[in-house]
């Protein structure tokens, strides 16, 4: 009745529906009208072209951070360091953007490349430690997040600027921004980054599924001993996996650096782009196409939520709860899978 | 006739499978009754029905002549039925005694009287010659000992009828001998035993009667003294099975593999291979005999590139391959059927398609300039699966969901298909049933006939005697004797493996 593939698609959909239903239930308990609430959410995300532009802008870094986590997952690693790699990519792209002037055809790709390289370098360290010394990547990447946060602040204050809290705006030749897109969407902050993000998803799919390298990466992710037996270089593949994952994360940073904001400002804490990437990857089943849909859902909820207090009087906290509930239901997908299979059995 | 257990006309279904149909099992008081069948024949299912874990769709069960309904394992316990499962159910960090009394602890003022329990365990252990230390932690004792703890667990609960589910599958040959003794002493004390196995020799050795099931159907019950291995095998498989593989005399040609004065340490840094010399020629099978843990595994791993060697040389066609990567070793013409097929042989979460090209995925025609060509990969996978009779629903099925025999056939197909000069086969038939064993033996002999060199590692003397043209016996990291099946017998091999250096036959061989 249900194929395996269908089950894999059904699980996130059912999780989302259950999350939305429980969100509605909670709104009811607290005396809000869930229909009004969700209508406000919908309007806030898609109500007019401005909101649509903002939603797509928000989705863009989520796609890339989701790809970063998913890529590592698929190759047997848990990259919690996406957050820090995002900072490094953000900083690198801005740095290239403010440091010199060059024709756009050189400057923009260079800024994007710098972001990918910086993220990759930040992923290389835990990859190396894991491959050569067997240090667990989760511990190292968590620590690397703090190192990234504070060293980026220090670099902004003392290297790029003279004790300022914020870099200058990047040169227009290094910016993903587009007047045309802005005008089209009633002056939202929509920029060309979504092209980069979609391209990133394509690259991940192609690399993992179609190339010799992807074969090795997946094989090492599943079984290191068998991969060694089969003649693969296990250490090199572990390092490469973290490097590529980090590069995706770095690109997510570039979306903010030379896309949304155009500068790097000193930060007091995490942006959560990286941590939300974990949920995006989970919801998207760690597949490139799934990550795009999951990021879209996350972006929609985040942007749409901003409209809920004004239009329906529902506090933003509640939206956070709905998001958390959706993640909860995805994480307990085991339970949903079990229910589906049971259903399947009775249907026979 | 007095039967302690009667299972009559049992039928048990799982979704899509009939695991038992028309099965009858009648066990007499004080006998060792074998339950024989291939992997997947439904042996464990039948015993789980008897133990109350499954409810049958049809049939009756009588215990000591009385019709019973065994709704759960507690009922089975109360009826005096105890079961030692294929996979042990022990708590690693608990002591032997704690594991045994778990759930029915002797109490003293609301606390567990562990002294009393230890005493009881000790008494039981002595009564049946089990020789276990009641205070040892489970994680510190061998698998063989853990099995005895499981047996004690059933005895402690007053079992009269013991079900042992493939107890010998996890044991070494000496441990099997000891288990045999234990079973004999259990029946002497009036217990009855149901022994599940697919090893025919064991049945001939210890059992009184034997019930055969095949593909879920009850086939027959025989007196062991009235039957023989060949008859049992054909009842079990449903066709004639040959045990001694047809083999023409070897025609050894060029020296392919040459190992000289090799020293290898294991992962703890203990020297396990202490100066081994070994040659393997084209067109011959060289068997390495020995008790597990005498350096055979390390030797094989050094030859195949999985482990570094400390000194000495390994050459194939005169080219040195010591301390080369597995990729280099593979490319110089060596195939490896690894001892642990789940750890090394397959990526269990990969589809069969990917597993069939695990070493060759990067080569033409499976890949061109770094891009995989799934069309030719699929073609290769399909043809290998067909040729080697790997039973899988499709090439997209994950290796994990195949049975052990089919996984092994897939590995063997993949390794032979590369047309290697040397095939290193480590325990190629471990845990497989006779049909699969026969298939694999024939394949290895066929390859020998094509002029390939085969290095066989096995802990089963039968296999060594049956397949090898030459036998190297390893003991304590050294080759202590070289002989051939014509010049020796299992008894002598057993002595050599145990370290008695009777090498008188070498001279006149
Ligand atoms: N819990 C179960 N659910 C579904 N199928 C099962 C289950 N247990 C066993 N089977 C199936 O029943 C058949 C008999 O299995 P089993 O009794 O374990 O065989 P044996 O012990 O003889 O190797 C096999 O085809 C197996 O796949
Ligand atoms: Mg079984």
Image (cartoon, helix red, strand yellow):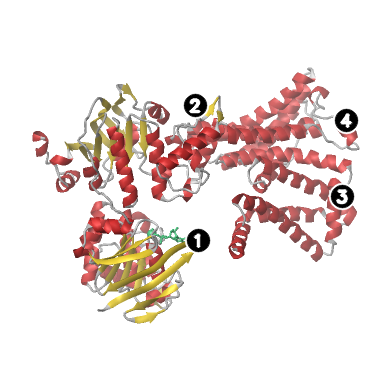
Where does label 1 land, which residue? B16
Task: Answer with left or right where residue A201 lies relative to residue A299.
Answer: left
Residue B147, horizontal then vertical, whole percent: 32, 60
Q: Are marks 4 and 3 on the same chain?
A: yes
Q: Which residue is mark 4?
A: A180
B233 relative to B255, above or below: below
Residue B420 placement, left or right of A250: left
Disc 4 versus disc 1: distance between alpha carbons?
61 Å
In three-dimensional space, the C-alpha distance between marks 1 and 2, rounded to whole angstroms, equals 41 Å
Q: Nearer the viewer, mark 4 or mark 1?
A: 1
Look at the image and tell me whether residue A215 can be seen.
yes
- Tally of marks: 4
Residue linked to disc 3:
A43
- Side (left or right) of B398 relative to A119: left
Residue B327 appears at what percent x and percent y?
42, 29
Which of B136 and A180 lies nearest the eye of the viewer?
A: A180
Say whether mark 1 is within 8 Å of ligand 1.
Answer: yes
Q: Secondary structure at mark 3?
A: helix
Question: Of B311 and A287, which appears nearest the observer?
Answer: A287
The numbered mark 4 sits on a residue in which chain?
A
Q: Earlier in the sequence, mark 4 or mark 3?
A: 3
| 3 or 1: mark nearer the eye | 1
Image point 43% across, 69% down: which residue? B11
Residues under labels 4 and 3: Cα distance? 23 Å
Q: Quadrant of residue A139?
A: top right
């Amino acid at each position: 009745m249900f194929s395996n593939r269908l089950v894999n698609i059904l699980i996130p959909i059912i999780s989302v529906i259950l999350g939305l239903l429980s969100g509605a239930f909670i709104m009811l308990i607290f005396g809000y009208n869930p229909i009004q609430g969700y209508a406000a959410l919908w309007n806030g995300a898609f109500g007019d072209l401005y909101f649509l532009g903002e939603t797509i802008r928000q989705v863009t870094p989520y796609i890339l951070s989701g790809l970063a986590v998913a890529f590592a997952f698929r190759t047997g690693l848990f990259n919690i360091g996406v957050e820090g790699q995002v900072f490094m990519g953000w900083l690198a792209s801005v740095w290239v953007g403010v440091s010199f002037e060059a024709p756009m055809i050189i400057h923009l790709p260079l800024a994007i490349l710098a972001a990918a390289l910086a993220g990759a370098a930040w992923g290389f360290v835990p990859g190396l430690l894991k491959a050569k010394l067997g240090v667990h990547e989760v511990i190292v990447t968590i620590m690397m997040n703090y190192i990234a946060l504070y060293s980026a602040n220090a670099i902004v204050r003392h290297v790029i600027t003279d004790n300022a809290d914020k870099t200058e705006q990047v040169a227009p030749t290094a910016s993903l921004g587009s007047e045309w897109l802005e005008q089209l969407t009633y002056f939202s902050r929509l920029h060309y980054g979504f092209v980069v993000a979609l391209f990133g998803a394509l690259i991940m799919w192609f690399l993992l599924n179609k190339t010799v390298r992807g074969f090795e990466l997946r094989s090492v992710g599943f079984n290191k001993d068998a991969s060694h037996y089969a003649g693969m270089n296990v250490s090199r593949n572990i390092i490469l996996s973290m490097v590529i994952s980090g590069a995706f994360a770095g690109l997510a940073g570039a979306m903010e650096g030379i896309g949304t904001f155009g500068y790097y400002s000193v930060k007091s804490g995490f942006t959560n782009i990286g941590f939300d990437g974990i949920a995006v990857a989970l919801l998207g089943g760690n597949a490139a196409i799934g990550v795009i849909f999951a990021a879209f859902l996350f972006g929609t909820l985040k942007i749409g939520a901003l409209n809920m207090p004004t239009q329906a009087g529902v506090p933003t906290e509640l939206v956070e709860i709905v998001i958390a509930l959706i993640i909860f239901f995805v994480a307990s997908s085991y339970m949903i899978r079990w229910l589906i299979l049971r259903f399947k059995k009775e249907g026979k | 006739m007095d039967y302690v257990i009667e299972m009559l006309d049992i039928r048990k279904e799982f979704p899509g499978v009939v695991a038992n149909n028309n099965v009858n099992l009648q066990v007499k008081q004080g006998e060792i009754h074998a339950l024989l069948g291939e992997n997947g024949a439904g042996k464990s299912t039948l015993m789980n029905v008897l133990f109350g874990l499954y409810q049958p769709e049809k049939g009756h069960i009588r215990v000591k002549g009385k019709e019973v309904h065994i709704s759960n394992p507690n009922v089975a316990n109360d009826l005096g039925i105890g079961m030692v499962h294929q996979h042990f159910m022990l708590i690693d960090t608990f002591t032997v005694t704690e594991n045994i009394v778990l759930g029915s602890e002797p109490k003293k003022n609301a606390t567990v009287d562990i002294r009393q329990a230890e005493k009881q365990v000790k008494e039981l252990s002595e009564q049946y010659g089990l020789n276990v230390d009641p205070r040892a932690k489970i994680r510190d004792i061998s698998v063989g000992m853990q099995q005895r703890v499981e047996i004690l667990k059933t005895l402690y609960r007053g079992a009269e009828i013991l079900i042992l589910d493939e107890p010998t599958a996890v044991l070494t040959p000496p441990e099997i001998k000891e288990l045999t003794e234990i079973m004999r002493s259990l029946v002497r004390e009036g217990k009855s035993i149901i022994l599940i196995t697919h090893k025919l020799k064991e049945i001939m050795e210890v059992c009184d009667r034997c019930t055969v099931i095949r593909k879920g159907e009850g086939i027959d019950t025989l007196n062991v003294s009235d039957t023989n291995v060949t008859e049992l095998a054909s009842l079990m498989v449903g066709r004639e099975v040959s045990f001694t593989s047809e083999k023409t005399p070897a025609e050894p040609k060029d020296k392919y593999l040459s190992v000289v004065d090799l020293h290898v340490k294991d992962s703890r840094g203990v020297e396990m291979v202490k100066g081994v010399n070994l040659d393997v020629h084209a067109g011959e099978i060289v068997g390495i005999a020995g008790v597990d843990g005498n350096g055979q595994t390390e030797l094989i791993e050094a030859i195949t590139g999985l482990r570094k060697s400390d000194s000495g040389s390994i050459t194939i066609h005169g080219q040195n391959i010591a301390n080369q990567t597995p990729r280099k070793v593979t490319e110089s013409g060596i195939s490896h059927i690894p001892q642990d097929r789940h750890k090394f042989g397959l990526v269990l979460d990969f589809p069969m398609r990917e597993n069939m090209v695990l070493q060759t995925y990067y080569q033409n025609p499976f890949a061109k300039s770094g891009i995989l060509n799934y069309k030719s990969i699929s073609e290769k996978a399909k043809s290998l699966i067909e040729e080697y009779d790997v039973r899988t629903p499709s090439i997209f099925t994950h290796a994990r969901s195949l049975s052990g025999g089919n996984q092994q056939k897939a590995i063997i197909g993949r390794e032979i298909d590369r047309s290697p000069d040397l095939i290193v086969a480590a325990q190629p038939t471990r845990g497989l049933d006779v049909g699969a064993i026969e298939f694999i033996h024939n394949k290895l002999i066929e390859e020998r006939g094509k002029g390939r060199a085969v290095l066989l590692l096995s802990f089963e003397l039968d296999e060594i005697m049956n397949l090898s043209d030459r036998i190297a016996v390893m003991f304590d990291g050294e080759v202590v004797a070289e002989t051939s099946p014509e010049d020796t017998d299992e008894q002598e091999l057993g002595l050599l493996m145990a370290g008695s250096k009777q090498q008188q036959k070498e001279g006149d061989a």
